Image: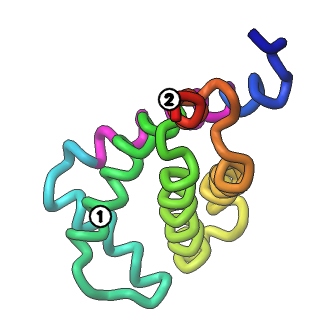
Amino acid sequence: MPKPHPVDIGLLVLRVGLGAMMLFHGVPKLLGGPQKWEKLGGAMTHVGIDVWPTVWGFAAALTETLGAVLLAVGLLTRLNASLLLATMVVAAAMHLGKGDGVAGASHAIEDGIAFLTLLLAGGGRYSVDAWWRGRR
């Protein structure tokens, strides 16, 4: 077995930590039902989309729950990181559009940077993606 590499350990910590925190944010949104989804999806107006807020809100809530779990285990890491990044772009745009400034949008921006990192780097050696590649 190859020696553990600090970069792969770092990617594992990043995936599991971010996945757990996003799950914490996503579950209440997903369980909130259509009223919560419509309100959440209303944030899309800040990126110029004003149709189907319930659909967009459900998609964001699902991404923050199921996508977070898949990210944590490293399954379809780049896809889930890209979906979570898109969610954070909308969240940051909403905060900036409401006048919250960079301080109000900082959490979404910081998470977005981390998701961009995972999109570029992938899940690392300690991910389901890597295990699956090794089996083929």
Q: Amino acid at mark 2?
A: Val
Q: Secondary structure at mark 2?
A: helix
Quadrant in which residue 103 is drawn: bottom right
Quadrant in which residue 17 is drawn: top right
Identify the image's colour scheme: rainbow, by chain, secondary structure or one colour.
rainbow
Q: Is residue 96 visible?
A: yes
Span shown in magenta: 13-29
In this orientation, which residue lies closer to the viewer: 124 or 114?
A: 124
Alpha carbons under labels 2 and 1: distance apart = 24 Å
Q: Is residue 63 magenta?
A: no
- Name the residue beneath numbered marker 2: 73
Residue 52 lies left or right of residue 125; in this view the side is left
The residue carrying pointer 1 sits among few (fewer than 14), some (14 to 19) or many (20 or more) residues within 10 Å by Cα, namely many
Q: Is residue 21 visible?
A: no
- Percent across and percent down for residue 8 are 76, 28
Q: Amino acid at mark 1?
A: Gly
130 w.r.t. 57: above or below: above
Q: Report the magenta stretch's main SS.
A: helix
Q: Which mark is residue 57?
A: 1
Q: Residue at x 64, y 24 (%)?
A: 126
Q: Residue at x 42, y 34 (%)?
A: 69
The N terminus - image quarter: top right
Q: Secondary structure at mark 1?
A: helix
- The residue furthest front is 136
Residue 38 lies left or right of residue 5; in this view the side is left
Q: Residue at x 52, y 66 (%)?
A: 86
The disc, 2 or 1, on the residue closer to the chain's N-terminal end is: 1
